[in-house]
Amino acid sequence: MKTLGFMLPYYSKTGGGVFQHALSIIDGLTAHSTKYRYRIFYYNKDDVGYISGRGLDSVGLSPVSKKSLPERISTMFDLFFDTKRPGSAGDGRVDLMVSPFPSMYAYSKRMPYLVSIQDLMHRYYGSFPEFPLMERLRRDMLYANAARHAVLIAVDDAQNADDLERFYKIPRKKVRVIHYVPPGYVYEYKDMTAERAREILVKYNLQPDYLFYPAQFWHHKNHSRLIRALKAISDDRGVTIPLVLTGSPESREYSKVMGLVDQLNMRGQVTILGYVSQEEIVALYKAATALVFPSLFGPTNIPPLEAFLLGTPVACSNLFSMPKQVGDAGLLFDPFDINDMSQKICRIWTDEALRLELTDKGRRRAEGMDLRRYAGEWEKVIDEAMELI
């Protein structure tokens, strides 16, 4: 039996969608695929808790922040001058490494690898604070080389394949599309009753009926426009809509968001919970009137899929491939247009018939989303990569 390596991201809780994506893959494969042995590579020891009880081997890696300057320079030299070539797993630990995010670890160890690339948004939003010049250059070097040296590349949407070809000249024949599904814990708790959800949320003194937005506080998550849209609804229509947010207080834009909430006198309207448990995330979806998802990034995203599975109506951005991902199961808005956002949010908040319709369509859309199918798609691509080594 061959051994499949699997990397957890350097950033776990603060990694947002990348970490959820990683959990989805490992949850699916370890639960539904017995073809391979699995070995988990992690940077943060706390992440071992996510895989405990599954009988998996694990390998701790040195955090990037602890690497010496000569080691970093050596890695950059190798990438720039292409001095190393991935071949067979020289240390014998794995036959193929799966990296659910752009990484050159396997390349540096001469292990063949399969890489998942979520997006190339730094190419679309170069002026955003997330992407100063050096970060854009770093990403270009990392993403291009991770894709170039991978056996195969997995993406969630055809736009990613187009972007890889457009920006880095990566041939489409190397790219395989595997659409996102929610992580395993969402399936585990999906049958939670409304009563149980209320019990769980007592600790936060939350009452049902609010808009829910689970996202880290980054500029591209667009919290500021969302808050201004809610303020406009309150001022223009006299409708005050509670908003519940999750995300790390250590995130990049947290202080700016809190400053705006104070400036607009909305402390009583906006609740920020910080980190919550996996069960609590599901409870927050269950008790919400709707998910609002104003992110500026794509091509697609995981939270609308979680909402579909859990029976929560969805209002979200109309950018990139989001309209295709959501279809008619969500109410779409222009996330750059506060007026359009406020109109759509007010509509989903006040129109119960619309919410029931969206919930029904979302559940039907979620019928094809399950971890067994997802694991099968990943196993097929992994088998293909194994044959190409």
Image: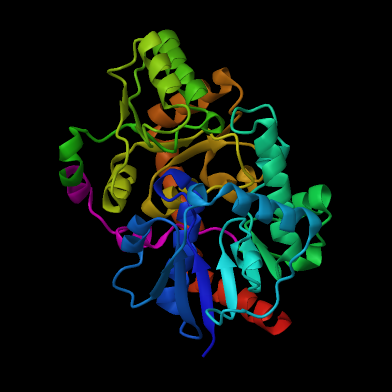
The structure residue drawn at horizontal position 36% and vertical position 12%, both measured from the top left corner, is: 262
Position of residue 310 relative to residue 340, above or below, is below
The structure residue drawn at horizontal position 53% and vertical position 77%, both measured from the top left corner, is: 4
Of residues 99 and 267, the one nearer the viewer is: 99
Position of residue 189 relative to residue 53, above or below, is above
Q: Which residues are magenta?
A: 179-198
Of residues 224 and 151, the one nearer the viewer is: 151
- Residue farthest to the bottom? 1
Position of residue 171 relative to residue 36, above or below, is above
Q: Quadrant of residue 89?
A: bottom right
371 left or right, relative to 295? left
Residue 193 locus on image (x, y percent): 23, 53
Residue 118 shows in the view? no
The structure residue drawn at horizontal position 49% and vertical position 22%, both measured from the top left corner, is: 224
Residue 381 locus on image (x, y percent): 64, 74
Residue 192 magenta-highlighted: yes
Residue 377 locus on image (x, y percent): 58, 72
Of residues 90 and 160, the one nearer the viewer is: 90
